[in-house]
Amino acid sequence: MTPRSNTRTDQARIPKPDSLISRVFTTDHRIIGIQYLILALVSVVIGTLLSLLMRIHLVWPDWPLPLHGPILPEDYLALVTIHGTIMLFFVLTTAPQAGFGNLILPAQIGARGMAFPTLNAASFWLTALALLTLLSSTFVPGGAAISGWTAYPPLSAIPSAGPGQALGMDLWLTSIALFAIASTASSINTLTTIIRNRCAGMIWERLPLTVWGWFTAALLSIIAFSVLLAAILLLLCDRHAGTSFFLPTGDLVNGVLHHGGNGSPLLWLHLFWFFGHPEVYIAILPGMGLTSMLLANFSHRRVFAYRTMIATTLLIGLLGILLWGHHMFVAGLNPFASSAFSISTMAIALPAAAKVLSWLATTWRSRPSYKTPMLFALGFVSLFITGGLTGPILAQPILDEYLHNTFFVIAHFHLIMAMAGIFGLYAATYYWFPLITATRTRSGRLMSEPLGRFHFWSTLIGAYAVFLPMHLTGLAGEPRHYAQLTGIPGPGGSLSPAGALLAHTIPLNHFITYAAIFLAAAQLPFLFNLVRSLRRGAPASSNPWHATTLEWHPALNPFSPSSASDTPEISVYRAPCHYRSIQAELTFLPQWIPNTVDQVEIKEATSAKPE
């Protein structure tokens, strides 16, 4: 499909808002992107604090929470549920796809904005409403939901099943339903923008790999969140309309015998994990695309096997939809179905390995510039490889039967999705911070490099210190979702038989908890760096990283004070990441510089040194 010209009036620059209300309820994609990032930042702070409470309770179960008292088992399960929900939906999905997608994607394809500005704003406010709904569930009678982020029936389908299964569960389901609607609308906007609003010359093969990540994640979002929304509506019907989609006949729950129809909890597992596994790639694919671009940018190389990287992105998205069943190996699947899902799960390692090989080949024997964004991109690669190595283990049904629902699984997906995803977000923040902070009247700012390097190394060490030992506790059989593992005091101070569960893992659990506190504390320099750099960061040039993609075009990035009327038409002449050596000096060749420009002119146009 031929891209539309970017000279249409509906893509003109949106006027600068002149009031607080117009700023808050704006349709400017840049401001909406920043709003998404602020929402994700608030969410990650809350989610991190909840995770610390969980770790502290596991090793010091008698520690009373200030202003609350002892953490009861239902309180612990509520912490698990809210932590997982916030981090997965409102951080790992919201920040890379909606946050940086709104902020950067239009400029990377030469567009003046998103295709549907009003729908874009509505998607953000639905997401914010979903977060408020989720947090409000903590304060209702009966407490927040305790079913985990998976909300398995039949307990989640019966309001009288116990603490957290009444109004708190309804609010959890409502929150996720609102989020599903918002994400679907945002993904439709993203796909339409990429397909219809590309500038002249921006053919598919010239799209940056970040755009391919956003494109594939948006496709997955529309499919996966639509199924999740349908499943939530069915579960709400079971809870309040007398249906039995997920309730079997004669189910005895909390002393009450339910004479329902012939529903099955297995149906929920199929519907939920059909969403749940693509969600992993919705969170990680934008980070993969950005990592590819940053490694090439700071290594001054082209991306190795660029077309193959595009194909592997699409293939990961396709396979990500087909292998949801490996989450259900212990649910009584037909052995032939288990074999099929096992094969498809191992098959996804092929395009993932191809990406790793491309990243290594791109940086091989280069002389990279180890700026903070590059360090976090390399950290992404490290965590992705480490977490991915345990994937083929869990893909084997016979091994998964033992490791399922243990801390081994916790370690696996926190390394490959949570920590790798967070490293991708940090790389994006440091890299695009000049664009985040730039306005029409002030140049963008750079974040502190010494603080950034300290933040990187402390976070990398903390991530491995927390999650590598969890593999060992998981192999020892330590189950997840248990409120107390480290022993119950018995008579005379000894451990009672019930408290002897996995007592030999107590020292390792103490180490993990101390490491988790260290990892959380390591984020304080980042927050300080972020706040300080907003006002006092070093001024950045219009293209501080020698980037070749269009978001750094003078007419598209916020450095330029030009209006829409005097902005020249933007065209693209090549794929990104082209570097040349001119008179023994390395220079970069942005996508927007014509091929007919004299070499001296190219050198003059790209001679600005990185900050």
Image: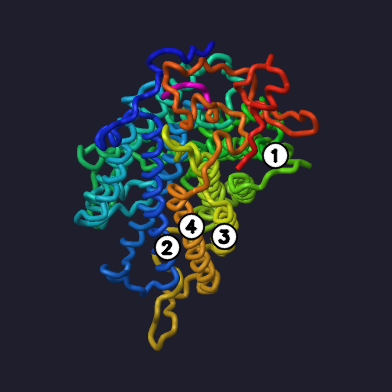
What residue did someone put label 1 on?
Answer: 299
- The residue carrying pointer 2 sits among few (fewer than 14), some (14 to 19) or many (20 or more) residues within 10 Å by Cα, namely some
In primary-sequence order, the first of circles 1 and 2 is 2
Q: Which residue is drawn at 44% across and 84% down?
A: 494
- From the top left corner, tell me how far across and down residue 69 is, in percent: 28, 71
Q: Is the magenta stretch mostly helix, strand or loop?
A: loop
Task: Give yes or no for residue 120 being in the magenta stretch.
Answer: no
What residue did someone put label 4 on?
Answer: 523
Judge depth for marks 1 and 2 and give the one in front.
1
- From the top left corner, tell me how far across and down residue 375 is, in percent: 62, 48
In the rendered structure, find residue 52 and report the number of the disc placed on it: 2
Q: Which amino acid does label 2 sit on?
A: Leu
> In this rendering, would 223 be left or right of 239?
right
**Image: 175 above or below 105:** below
**Image: 76 above or below 28:** below
Distance between the Cα atoms at labels 4 and 1?
27 Å
